[in-house]
Image: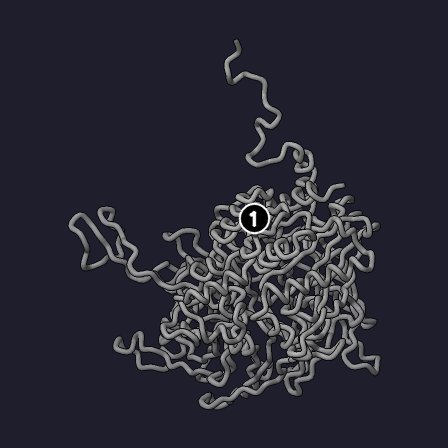
Amino acid sequence: RRPKAMASAHPSQGLPSGMDPSMVDEYASQSKLLQEFVKIPSIGKAWVFTSKDENASRAMVSVSQSDLLANKKRSFLLNTHISKSSSKSVSFQWSPFPVEMSGVSAVVPSPSGKKLLLVRNAEDDDSPTKLEIWGPCQLENEIHVARSVHGSLYADGWFEGISWNQEETLIAYVAEEPPQPKPEFNDSGYKKEGSSQKDFRSWKGQGDIEDSWGETYSNKRIPALFVANISSGEVRALKGIPRSLSAGQVIWAPSSSYSLVFVAWSDDNGFQETPRKLGIKYCYNRPCALYAAADPFKEEADKPSTDSNKGDTAALVKLTADLSSAFFPRFSPDGKYLVFISAKSAVDSGAHNATNSMHKIDWPTDGKLEGSLSVSDVPTVMSPQDGCFPGMYCSGLLRFPWLSDGRTMILSSAWGSKEVILSINVASGEVSRVSPQDSDYSWNVLALDNNNILAVSSSLVTLPQMYYGFEDSHTDKPCQWDWQEISSPFPKPSDKVSSLLADHKFSVIKIPVSNPSDKLPDGAKLPFEAIFVSGKDSASSPTIVVLHGGPHSVYPSSYSRSLAFLYAQGYNLLVVNYRGSLGFGEEALQSLPGNIGSQDVNDVLTALDFVKKRGLIDASRVAVVGGSHGGFLTTHLIGQAPETFVAAAARNPVCNLQLMVGTTDIPDWCFLEVYGKEGKNCFTESPLADTLTQFYQKSPISHISKVKTPTLFLLGAKDLRVPVSNGLQYARALKERGVDTKIIVFPEDIHGLDKPQSDFESFLNIGVWFKKYMSK
């Protein structure tokens, strides 16, 4: 007899756990296609450096590409010369090869473009952070900063802030404060006197828990401000900032006794008796203010040189005491104004994001800042007229966003289901749309070249393409811009990908609100939007409904690798920007809190009915996918409309608010979205039984007995926003009821599931899952 191990193999033997043997070939073919999409690089930031010749300039563009094998994103810099002619044509001469920025956390050119800062954050607790100062042809200085001085620099996210002074002698930046003392133990017990020296006969304990800013920031220490002298290599901390403030977004001020302006977020969130830090990623509703302080080098130089005043605290001046929110500070070129964005509507209402406003402060030449009052330049738009400016939704500003008149600022913003480029006159408050008025493509500003704009444009069916914009002075129409396509340095995608993109089209559809209540404000009765992506035979093709998270975010019309991969499988996409999304005015946005699980669900079903009634899709083959609040909607929809969807996929979904409120980094979100504005006032760490019941009733799990849709769950084990227990509980309950369910947990991922391998496996499984249930 043969040994047992040599027996004839079962057809599924050797397959990965949970893989359907009938879908192995599909898994292989789809993974090959997805890799074609993954190879396509993404455009990041850009910098333009002007010269004495107004017809010539230089530019750097950062590009990233996913490295699946290493499970990380690789970053590159591309250089180009820009040549302009009098006939308003432009030519870009790209360098033949990019330069990889391996191990680099941040790239920050000096104002003149003659120096370049590269930041290399330490990879372990024993290594220093390195600040490299590069000149045109050489490394001019390398500053090693020990962990005892500060930790890693905040190179991205809310707290990011790295700024050269105008003289290019000092760099101000935000980094983790040095480690706080921990209790130390040895064979004799507790060591009363700690030591900075390593002692292999002792160990450090944990000490008391310290609040963090939640998702993404859980392993980071409090952000603090530092200034480095690039010649001497000396680094000094900006003292006098209490640990209850977390600093970020530092910039240099014009000549004044207060040299630095920065944003600081307070532990006091404004609605807790015992304040603590709550999650800040994607959360514009955390109170913050602008502060001014002296440069620690200048402050030290102005004092008598004695040991007694070493470490004296610097005076801080709060610049925006009249506002609950102020961030992205920028000085006008003449130094007369300090302009900034405010999320006052989000902070005051409690919504995690809302319509922004723009403000300015007159910057005094005498340095006396007390009593400064901000003036609103661009107010919050409540209910936009059709086709008119819907309000500002700004997620970032250029380091230098000004045209040469010194009063016109260029920025990107959401406008319905599109991203657009705006010009804002900070003297008059006039707002104009700079990107093409008749385009449903999304546009983003990359950099300014004097009075011209370097931008990127794309759509759900078009890869990102760079453009160069000139203001048209030969027309009577104000703010008319001509856009010239730039020769691309990137290789074309494979023939297969090019063909798939060319075979699809998209349109932005206005969806009338179904039976709006008389109690709704006018802005909440306006149509919302959906983006419909279709191939050549949409009426007989299956359709995927795509839902964004938040809920106060938006799915723009810009290119998305993940969505392109899905429609490349032969699906239509219906991307729904339900009421509550950004880009449609404040009244529409604020109509959703208190009505989640009903208003947003009805909007999605209304959009689906809209395309069904027009014969645009095969109504018998519809699937739904969403993440976070989009996963909340996905699991609500398969419970409230159990006959509508033949398959579903949910990424880190909110399934049970009753469970989430005690485990998430944003428990206030649960109260606000369930109770509306009143939720901010009734927020507590110990909700009553009636409150928990209300949370359960608003949750998808309250409809689970009706679910019959096969559902795929993709969960991050280290998610602090919607902890993995939420999706697991719901998925296991579906299995208990005999519903076809698949669960994949990514052990090292947080809420976004954005590690390259996790993102790849996630969407590959979504594609195969939908193919399994939507094939004829």
In the image, residue 285 lies at what x, y percent?
A: 51, 72
* Image mark count: 1
Instruction: Please identify the residue farthest to the top as the structure is shown.
Output: 1
In the image, residue 704 lies at what x, y percent?
A: 56, 52
- The disc labelled 1 sits on which kind of residue? Leu
Task: Tell which of 364 and 33 is nearer to you.
Answer: 33
459 left or right of 272?
A: right
In the image, residue 347 lies at what x, y percent?
A: 51, 76
Q: In the rendered image of this protein, does residue 280 appear above or below residue 474?
A: above
In the image, residue 22 lies at what x, y percent?
A: 67, 33
Q: On the rendered image, what quadrant is the C terminus found in? A: top right
Is residue 501 in sight in this rendering?
Answer: yes
Q: In the rendered image of this protein, does residue 615 appear above or below residue 512?
A: above
Q: Residue at x 62, y 62 (%)?
A: 45
Instruction: Please identify the residue farthest to the front as the structure is shown.
Output: 705
Q: What colour-coding does the image apply? A: one colour
Task: Tell which of 204 and 557 is nearer to you.
Answer: 557
Say which quarter of the image contains residue 82.
Answer: bottom right
Identify the residue position indicated by label 1 in the image. 714
Task: Tell which of 683 and 303 is nearer to you.
Answer: 683
Determine whether the residue tagged by mark 1 lies in a helix, strand or loop. strand
Is residue 50 in sight in this rendering?
Answer: no
Instruction: Please identify the residue farthest to the left as the structure is shown.
Output: 188
Q: Residue at x 31, y 81 (%)?
A: 304
68 left or right of 123?
A: right
Q: Residues within 10 Å of mark 1 (few under 14, many from 20)?
A: many
